[in-house]
Image (tube, rainbow, N blue to C red):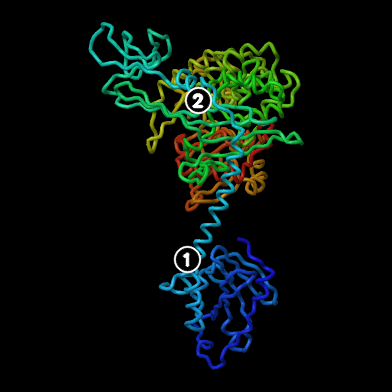
Amino acid sequence: MKMNKRELRKFADPGLNFNPGDGLLLYKEIEYIVRAAVKIIAGKRTLAVYFYNREKSAENCCIPEYALFQLKDDYIALQRTDDGKLKWRTSCIDNISEKYGSFTKKCAFYKLRDEQIITSFCGMENSTGFDALNKLQTTVMTDRLIIKQKARDRAIIERMRVIPAIPRDFNDWIRNDLLPHYIFYQYKRTKKPIQGYCTACCRDVLIKGQKHNASGKCPGCGKDIIFKAKGVAKKLCDRITVQILQKTAGNEFAARIFKVKHCLNSSCEPVLDIWENARLFIWRDESNIICEQSYFYDYNKGLLTKWREGTRPRFSIYQYNFECDICGYLYVKNLDKILAGTVWQYSQLERFADIDCEPLEVLPYLKGYLRYPAIEYLVKFGLTKLTSHIVYGKNEYGGEEIINTNGKTFRETLGVGLEDLPVLQKVNADINQLELYQALKKQGFRADETLLAWYKEQEISLPENILIPLKYTTPFKIMRYAEEQFEKLKNLVKNYGYRRYFNKSAVLSEYKDYLSMSEKLEYDMTDTFILFPKNLQESHDLASKLYDIKKASIFNGIVQEAYQGLLEQYSYKKDGLTVIPPKTSKEIVKEGQKLHHCVASYVEKVAKSECVILFIRQTEDIQKPFYTMEIRNGKVVQIHGQNHAAPTPEVNKFLEQWKRKKLPPANKTGAA
């Protein structure tokens, strides 16, 4: 019930006086003296509670500093500021003052009668005056919140009326096309066919050569299955996220997110739960800007509806939460119909979802298509990995742009010609494979799909790890040598249990460094003994020592000149760790010698500004080498500790904080 403020102002000062000899005026433990009265204001029986400043009242200034007006279903307070102005406050009695958190602890009733007036009005004669007021106001606040919540709920219910029904085959699509299928069987030691039960075709089949957790095909329906031995697989539970895009009203769409939980026990009885988890409304406004409005399903709260506006709260953005995940498999059977006649009619969204068959977010794709028209023909060519790079922006900390998203032709966009398309299509090249392919073309090489696939499989970070060896040998020999050396050196364990060659990419990186140092040491690069040493680790370390001696003094002055600028740009200190640049080339060499890695071979690159070498030190022992990292094109390309040790979790956490401070994200033309 709305209170009449104009009428309430007339009762802001009742004109009461205090007896100058009253001991309450001298009691310094309280700040305010309270008087109360019941009045008829604007035709309503109103409780008026007045709060007088004790010190001012003792000086015969009897004007209430606060006047609280209380109805059975509403309340409001009027504050008189130091300059004499009146200010309305809607806070409860304990928060009526900005000075105190528990205002009533600083107050005392002038007479017992004042307290009895309050308890009688509130209908709580057995409570104290302040408790009675607090309880009544709490009831009023609760009623206010309920009214507001119901109003919000009604608006949400009205918003949801435009949501259409789910297609009839939606559940069958989830069950048949997305969820994994199994064949359960009773284990027996026999070479004869045994009976199993297929969850795809829901019937008994004869199987042979089965193995628990192995993949195969059902001999009955031909679908891909996983074998599960009863007794070993006691209970299975698969969870996935799916979504459907539907037309709602006008030019608006709704992306509806569903969670799926599919459980199977040893008796092969499936339990499928599908529930809607979130809704995202998408539309274009009059300025052709893509707008969105998110809702999530609240399982615990709700008066009229459990739908809530906004995104689902989560404990931490760094921890996966199944309920908060809105990236899901897209139902594509209705896309032709709902996108027809819209700006997304030729967006190739259906083909994009079909080729990758992976969970995706719809909104970034729709936005990206309008911003980068190249997306359409990239998807038509089947290059969905490159499309994902444009849409979802994989390079967080920048670096050189591999894709020109403003290009009008295939060559302008990808930096290669249509004659290169078949190779890229065979591997569905991602951004790293394209970067390698571009670099190979510039050097006059043409990569086939075997090299590109191997490059991705081994997670090689830099094209030069391939380009430098290619100056002396063939792709096949590079791959074979890296694999042979990895098998030979993979168990080489250094201090603290770290492996120096933890994958083939690490082997290839050292091989590249070895060849670079060998060339500068004027080795015979046509000799296979030099090109393919039997033990890469020994040959690399020997070449590193010889090269350190040769070059330590050549670039010292250049490194010294760059020190101050690098210190201002990259220095950082937090959580007991510090990042600093080297002062001289000798420090870089010494770093490599102390940590037993090849950073000394990078002195020339540092002097030529091809890369930046930084030291990570423990703050308490700043002079002692700890970890070394290389920065190139605005991103960290490698980090090594003692004997090429990988960074610890503590160092990784520190580096993430350092990146956010010192390597701000570049302007990404590939981000949607």
Instruction: Specify the quadrant that holds the N terminus.
Output: bottom right
Q: What crowding class fits label 2: few (fewer than 14 Cα within 10 Å), some (14-19), or many (20 or more)?
A: many
Q: Nearer the viewer, residue 267 or 452?
A: 267
Q: Quadrant of residue 331?
A: top right
- Residue at the image position 46 percent from the left and 70 percent from the top: 123
Q: Can residue 325 be seen in this view?
A: yes
- Residue at the image position 48 percent from the left and 43 percent from the top: 651
Q: Can residue 613 be seen in this view?
A: no
Disc 2 marks which amino acid?
A: Ser
The location of residue 440, given as percent across then percent down, is 64, 18
Which residue is under mark 1? 135
For numbered disc 2, what is the local secondary structure? helix
Disc 1 marks which amino acid?
A: Lys
Q: What crowding class fits label 1: few (fewer than 14 Cα within 10 Å), some (14-19), or many (20 or more)?
A: some
Q: Nearer the viewer, residue 43 or 376?
A: 43
For numbered disc 1, what is the local secondary structure? helix
Q: Which of 599 and 612 is in front in this view?
A: 612
- Residue at the image position 55 percent from the left and 46 percent from the top: 579
146 shown above or below 179: below
Q: Which residue lies furthest to the top in this view?
A: 192
32 shown above or below 311: below
Q: Residue furthest front?
A: 43
Q: Which mark sits nearer the N-terminus, 2 or 1? A: 1
Q: Which disc, if any, is residue 505?
A: 2
The location of residue 273, given as percent across then percent down, is 42, 29
Foreground mark, 2 or 1, reads 1
Instruction: Specify the quadrant that holds the C terminus.
Output: top right
Spatial distance from mark 2 to mark 1, Cα to Cα? 69 Å
The location of residue 159, given as percent across then percent down, is 61, 38
- Residue at the image position 51 percent from the left and 24 percent from the top: 508
Q: Which of 485 and 203 is in front in this view?
A: 203
Q: In which quarter of the image is residue 553?
A: top right
